[in-house]
Amino acid sequence: MMNGLLHAHSGLRWIVLVLLVMLVAKAWQKGKADVPYTEQDRKLNLYTLIATHLQLLLGLALYFMSDKVNFDTSSWSVTVTRFFTVEHSLMMLLAIALITLGYVKAKKATSDTDKFRTVFRYNAIALLLILIAIPWPFRGFGSGWF
């Protein structure tokens, strides 16, 4: 079960990244062009929100089952344990909170330009946090591309 959760979490990462990049690029492009915020734009924002929340649920399951997460004080000096216990988890939670706030604030915004700006700001910061917090294979945390 642990292996299946890990592969699902790692595979969904790519869907989240593609959706986020598409959302940020569209918000940037359409915000500059002063075009209307369409139903398609709202759906892309919603699908990104859903995918990140699904990723959160998988991540929480892994958090409480993984041997890479340890709350013992002596494990804080171990880079891999500290990364997965604190750094990865907190940055991802913050990114998901930003994506959620961006969705809610864009929904409440009155003008289309404000909607695109809000979506861009919150999701661009979230994308940056996610890119920093992913345990890429070249970082040496024993993670693969999938």
Image (spheres, rainbow, N blue to C red):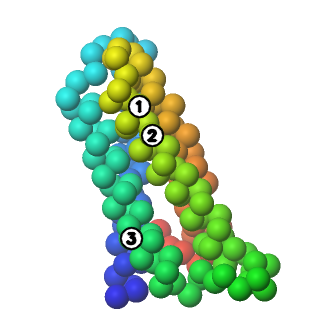
Residue 136: x percent and y percent? 57, 65
Where disc 2 sits, the SS reads helix
Name the kind of residue labelled 1 in the image: Lys
Q: Residue at x 78, y 86 (%)?
A: 74
Q: Which residue is mark 1?
A: 105
Name the kind of residue labelled 2 in the image: Leu
- Report the quarter where the N terminus lies: bottom left
Where disc 1 sits, the SS reads helix
Q: Residue at x 34, y 17 (%)?
A: 110
Residue 101: x percent and y percent? 45, 40
Disc 1 and disc 2: Cα gap in Å?
Answer: 6 Å
Nearer to the camera, 77 or 15: 77
Residue extending farthest to the front is 108
Q: Which residue is mark 3?
A: 58
Q: Residue at x 42, y 19 (%)?
A: 114
* Of labels 3 and 2, the one closer to you: 2
Q: Residue at x 41, y 44 (%)?
A: 100
Among numbered discs 3 and 2, the one appearing first in the sequence = 3
Disc 3 and disc 1: Cα gap in Å?
Answer: 26 Å
Where disc 3 sits, the SS reads helix
Asked if the residue at tag 2 contacts the one at tag 1, i.e. Cβ–Cβ closer than 8 Å, the answer is: yes
Residue 25 seen in the current view: no
Residue 10: x percent and y percent? 42, 69
Residue extending farthest to the left is 39
Classify residue 22 as left or right of residue 90.
Answer: left
Residue 90 against residue 64 in the figure, above or below:
above
Q: Which residue is mark 2?
A: 101
Asked if the residue at tag 2 contacts the one at tag 3, i.e. Cβ–Cβ closer than 8 Å, the answer is: no
Among numbered discs 3 and 1, the one appearing first in the sequence = 3
Nearer to the camera, 101 or 32: 101
